[in-house]
Amino acid sequence: MTYEILRLSNDPWTYRFFPFEISLFILGILSYRLYCRYKKIIDNYLANYSIESTKKYLTFVVLSISFFFETNATEHTLSKLIGTNYSVLIAYYGWIVAIPILFSICKNHKTDRLIGELSYSVYLVHVFVIFLVTELIQFSRIISVGWRGEISAMISIALAIALIRFVITPLEKKRYQYSKALVKHWVQHRALR
């Protein structure tokens, strides 16, 4: 409705305005619920395809990226028939099915787990990094603005790794210790009653 009637089909309405983005969160919830409901079936069916070796993982990454580009190509073709906004929405529904399958296949691989752990940290720092890199490029005039994305991505990943290593992991260890002590205290307190 907002796409067609109000003509709000550009940024910030498509990427930053939460009421219009909530559908993506809901689709993520549906995807997770779909996986939870059919976890045994999905895991049993895909048990032979579970990826644990690095060679298989790299092959899988290439295939996943190819799937992503194929999805974009299909979305582009579909957009000529029904409009860009509706083709994007239809493509999202394909990912509801694809994500649980991708997770089931890669869930035991350490690299995949590391990428998953990095994702939120990258999300936390990327806007700040993009702003900083843009300012530095404009100030220095040595590096082309065309490299802003690559430089920002590398710095964001490095900062995310540092954030996990020096902030999140120590906090998680402390949180675990406190929760363990709290449970122990609670159990002792209940035993004294």
Image (cartoon, rainbow, N blue to C red):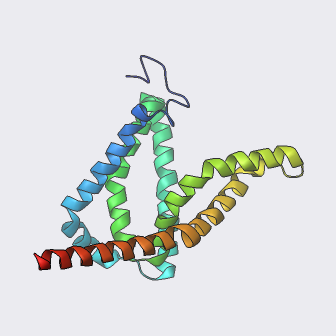
Q: Position of residue 22 (x, y in %)?
A: 38, 38
Q: 60 or 153: nearer the eye?
A: 153
Q: Decide if residue 81 is on the left or right side of residue 165.
A: left
**Quadrant including the C terminus:** bottom left
Q: Decide if residue 144 is on the left or right side of residue 68.
A: right
- Single out the residue that lies furthest toward the left: 193
Q: Residue at x 24, y 66 (%)?
A: 42
Q: Position of residue 64 (x, y in %)?
A: 47, 62
Q: 104 or 45: nearer the eye?
A: 104
Q: Decide if residue 49 is on the left or right side of residue 60.
A: left
Q: Is residue 107 visible?
A: no
Count of numbered circles on the image: 0
**Quadrant including the N terminus:** top left
Q: Residue at x 54, y 53 (%)?
A: 123
Q: Position of residue 156 (x, y in %)?
A: 64, 58
Q: Is residue 119 visible?
A: yes
Q: Residue at x 44, y 73 (%)?
A: 174
Q: 182 or 61: nearer the eye?
A: 182
Q: Is residue 106 above or below residue 126?
A: below
Residue 85 sits in which quadrant? top left
Q: Position of residue 145 (x, y in %)?
A: 79, 46
- Single out the residue that lies furthest toward the front: 192
